[in-house]
Amino acid sequence: MKIGELAKAANCGTETIRFYEKEGLLPAPDRTEANYRRYQHEHLERLRFIRNCRTLDMAHDEIRTLLQFMDKSHGDCAPVNHLLDEHITHVDIRLAELQKLRAQLIELRQQCANAQSIQDCGIIHGLAAMETEEKLPSASHLG
């Protein structure tokens, strides 16, 4: 199948496919005599796997590791379990960061209970007076 057919079957764009090829997540396909990419069913299966991992917010390195395990297809799945446990920890960290952000936004919103003029808006004044914190890198794998 051509790249457009693969994109349609996997519900993604052709640029996504090219990107995953460039990243080494999707193997390069054979080429026709006219130099068109010619994908096989295995490409579709792998692309769906990658897209499912991305839906779960997995980083490319995590996906790459899972693909390596999948390609070996021998041994036990303990390393896969460990990878998923680490990803769950990253999600927990991100949830905590989002809860903190939510609390800050609620506190800011409470500074302006009723609509009033912009000059008297508690949110605007709160944002202007807020202490600027150093942007620390996230403890999650997403950074």
Image (cartoon, rainbow, N blue to C red):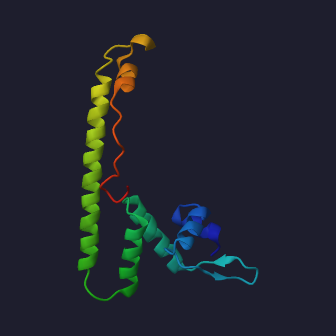
Residue 67 falls in image quadrant: bottom left
Q: Where is residue 39 in the image (x, y as percent from the top left)?
A: 60, 78
Q: In this view, does 115 lie above or below 39?
A: above
Indicate whether 23 appears above or below 93.
below
User: How far across and down, in percent of the image, does residue 135 sit?
Assistant: 36, 44
User: What residue lies at 36% left-to-right and 34% top-to-bottom?
Assistant: 132
Residue farthest right in this picture: 34
Residue situated furthest bottom in the rendering: 74
Q: Residue 123 appears at what percent x and percent y?
A: 37, 22
Is the N terminus in the top left, top right, bottom left or bottom right quadrant?
A: bottom right
Residue at x 28% of width, y 58% of height: 90
**Total marks in image:** 0
- Give coordinates of residue 74: x percent, y percent: 31, 89
Image point (26%, 53%), residue name? 93
Q: Is 25 on the left or on the right of 69, as rendered?
A: right
Q: Is 7 on the left or on the right of 115, as rendered? A: right
Q: Residue at x 38, y 57 (%)?
A: 142
Q: In which quarter of the image is the C terminus?
A: bottom left
Corner quadrant of residue 117 = top left
Question: Is 99 situated left or right of 127 in this image?
Answer: left
Q: Is residue 65 above or below residue 10?
A: below
- Rendered position, 133 above or below 115: below
Which of these two is toward me, 8 or 89?
Answer: 89
